[in-house]
């Protein structure tokens, strides 16, 4: 019910544009799960259900907190966990393999409270927040939009620049409503062309 096969005209256009190898074309011709479908998150959660239960059990034993977003796994807790990081990584790796998954050890890291702890490009130290550089960049763009007009700041050519900025400010507000008030005030000051 959630699978699809790519229509031949689409495969033909992609091949002519040089965007597909023969193997990729064959795989897309067969029924597959499309990325980004509305059902993707629910299916991922179903696939990882036993993994989540087992890692939650490990977290409980360690006195830690376990969370997962898509394929990003996070164990957080007291400082003593840092000393056991390599053992914990091995335990998590074994559980993941048992459940049909594999860790990407290049992406595995152990972060202390003294530096920004990020998950899915969100700072999660004490409360969710945008990374400082992202917040400052967005604030600067909004400031320049107020000063010089919005069109001059749309350097990436977004079709609906206003909606793009509103979405970025809404995302910041969802993470940290208090801090995002500055961004919302700047957004409200922008004079948009009629």
Image (tube, rainbow, N blue to C red):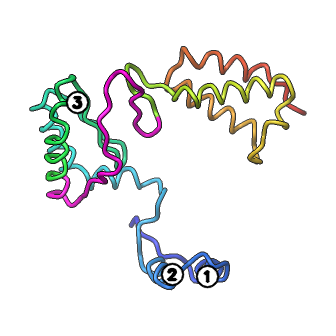
Residue at which label 3 appears: 65
Kindly indicate the quadrant of the structure image that contains residue 108. top left
Q: Which residues are magenta?
A: 96-121
The residue depicted at 29 percent of the width and 51 percent of the height is 105
Residue 135 placement (x, y as % from top left): 59, 26
Q: From this view, report whether residue 117 is shown above or below residue 99.
A: above
Position of residue 137 in the picture relative to residue 67 (left or right): right
SS state under label 3: strand
Could you tell which of marks 1 and 2 lies nearer the N-terminus?
1
Q: Residues within 10 Å of mark 1 (few under 14, many from 20)?
A: some
Q: Residues within 10 Å of mark 3 (few under 14, many from 20)?
A: some
Residue at which label 1 appears: 15
Position of residue 73 in the picture relative to residue 161 (left or right): left
Residue at which label 2 appears: 25
Q: Is residue 60 visible?
A: yes
Q: Quadrant of the C terminus?
A: top right
Label 3–label 1 contact, CB within 8 A: no
Please tell me which residue lies in front, 120 or 171: 120
Q: From this view, report whether residue 25 is shown above or below residue 95.
A: below
């Amino acid at each position: 019910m959630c699978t699809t096969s790519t229509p031949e005209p689409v495969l033909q256009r992609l091949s002519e544009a040089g965007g597909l190898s023969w193997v990729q074309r064959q795989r897309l011709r067969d029924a597959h799960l499309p990325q980004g479908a509305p059902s993707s998150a629910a299916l991922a959660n179903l696939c990882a259900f036993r993994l989540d239960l087992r890692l939650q059990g490990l977290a409980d034993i360690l006195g830690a907190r376990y969370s997962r977003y898509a394929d990003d796994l996070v164990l957080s807790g007291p400082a003593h966990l840092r000393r056991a990081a390599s053992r914990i990584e091995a335990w998590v790796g074994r559980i993941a393999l048992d459940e049909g998954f594999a860790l990407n050890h290049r992406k595995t890291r152990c972060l202390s409270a003294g530096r920004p702890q990020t998950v899915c490009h969100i700072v999660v130290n004490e409360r969710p927040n945008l990374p400082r550089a992202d917040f400052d960049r967005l604030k600067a763009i909004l400031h320049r939009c107020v000063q010089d007009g919005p069109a001059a700041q749309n350097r990436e050519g977004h079709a609906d620049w206003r909606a793009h900025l509103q979405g970025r400010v809404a995302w910041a507000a969802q993470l940290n409503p208090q801090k995002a008030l500055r961004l919302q005030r700047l957004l409200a000051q922008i004079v948009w062309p009629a």
